[in-house]
Image (spheres, helix red, strand yellow):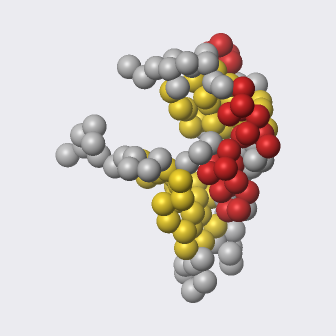
Amino acid sequence: MITSGTHVRIARPSLDLEAAERFYVGGLGLGVQWRSAGAGPGEHELLMVGPADGGWHFELTRDPRNPVAPSPTVDDLFVVYLGEAPDDALVRRLVEHGGTRVAAHNPYWDEHGVTVADPDGYRLVLCSRTWG
């Protein structure tokens, strides 16, 4: 049964796990929960990032023998509800760590936050609203 305490993993391909780590850990402030080199046949390089003691995390993968190119669309969003306007220092840090500030496809997100593309082109929205 799925409840509000059910843990969630979101997996995405990445062409550069070091760049993804700089963005999500150094820029956004998430922690590394797991890392694997994936050197054996059929294994993938893995980087799992998320908040300490959180109920979710990102699993970023790379198959060194047959890399899958990320194919984000303008509506592939990771939205973080901050409950206040995004701090300019956080947005600057995300850009300094490999992100690119972009206009949102849906103007709602520009009205209520800031959108930053990660090094693979997936979009992070820092939303000023609260969830619920």
Which residue occupies the foreground of this view, 26 or 120?
26
- Which residue is farthest bottom? 40
Residue 89 in view of the camera: yes
Furthest toward the top, the residue is: 111
Q: Provide residue 125's location: percent of width, then percent of height.
A: 62, 30
Quarter holding residue 115: top right
Q: Nearer the viewer, residue 89 or 56?
A: 89
Does residue 110 lie above or below 31 as drawn? Answer: above
| 10 horizontally vs 29: left or right | left
Can you tell which quarter of the image residue 28 is in? Answer: top right
Of residues 14 and 20, the one drawn nearer to the viewer in this rendering: 20
Answer left or right for 95 relative to 25.
right
Q: Residue furthest front?
A: 89
Residue found 37% across the figure and 46% down from its top: 55
**Residue for point 58% across, 54% down:** 12
Using residue 75 as the reference point, say whether residue 6 is left or right of it. left
Of residues 94 and 1, the one nearer the viewer is: 94
- Percent x, y of residue 17: 67, 62
Q: Residue at x 72, y 31 (%)?
A: 89
Q: Is residue 60 above or below residue 53?
A: below
- Up the image or down, 99 lies above or below 112; here it is below
| Residue 8 appears in the figure | no
Residue, x 69% and y 68% (percent of image)?
67
How far across and how far down the image is residue 96, in percent? 79, 43
Q: Quadrant of residue 102?
A: top right
Total marks shown come to: 0
Q: Measured from the top left, where is residue 5 in percent x and y?
A: 27, 42
- Quarter of the picture containing the C terminus is top left
Residue 75 vs 72, above or below: the answer is above
